């Protein structure tokens, strides 16, 4: 899911802008997860998915910039 979403966003949106937006969404997801007093399924999976998307996106964008 991270790879497919990352590829879609990088090809449809200006790559640096996509990275910035995903970074902010990851920060919000992690903040929600760490502040949770108990296990909440959607918060947990939101954090996992955003980490997957952001990590893949950063790797793809930095690799394409290095070429």
Image (tube, rainbow, N blue to C red):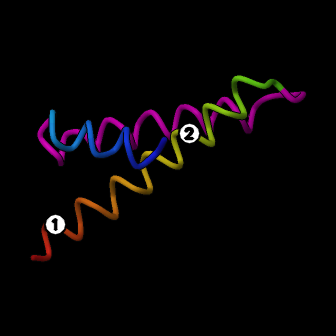
* Dot 2 and dot 1 residues touching (CB under 8 Å): no
Q: Which residue is mark 1?
A: 64
Q: Residues within 10 Å of mark 1 (few under 14, many from 20)?
A: few
Going from the N terminus, do you reach mark 2 or mark 1 first?
A: 2
Q: Which residues are magenta?
A: 13-39
Q: Is residue 35 magenta?
A: yes
Label count reads 2
Question: What residue is rendered at 75% in x and 32% in y?
Answer: 35
Question: What residue is rendered at 53% in x and 32% in y?
Answer: 28
Q: Residues within 10 Å of mark 2 (few under 14, many from 20)?
A: some
Looking at the rendered structure, the secondary structure element under dot 2 is helix
Q: Nearer the viewer, residue 12 or 31?
A: 12
- The x, y position of residue 24, in whole percent, is 41, 37
Looking at the rendered structure, the secondary structure element under dot 1 is helix
Asked if 37 appears above or below 15 in the picture, the reply is above
Question: What residue is rendered at 62% in x and 42% in y?
Answer: 48
- The x, y position of residue 26, in whole percent, is 49, 40
User: Which image quadrant is residue 18 in?
Assistant: top left
- The x, y position of residue 1, in whole percent, is 49, 41
Question: What residue is rendered at 29% in x and 42% in y?
Answer: 20
Which mark is on residue 43? none
Q: Which residue is mark 2?
A: 49
- The x, y position of residue 19, in whole percent, is 29, 46
Distance (Cα) linking label 2 and label 1: 22 Å
């Amino acid at each position: 899911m991270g790879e497919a979403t990352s590829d879609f966003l990088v090809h449809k949106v200006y790559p640096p802008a996509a990275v910035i937006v995903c970074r902010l969404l990851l920060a919000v997801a992690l903040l929600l997860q760490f502040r949770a007093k108990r296990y909440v399924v959607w918060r947990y999976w939101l954090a996992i998915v955003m980490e997957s998307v952001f990590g893949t996106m950063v790797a793809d964008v930095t690799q394409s910039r290095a070429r």
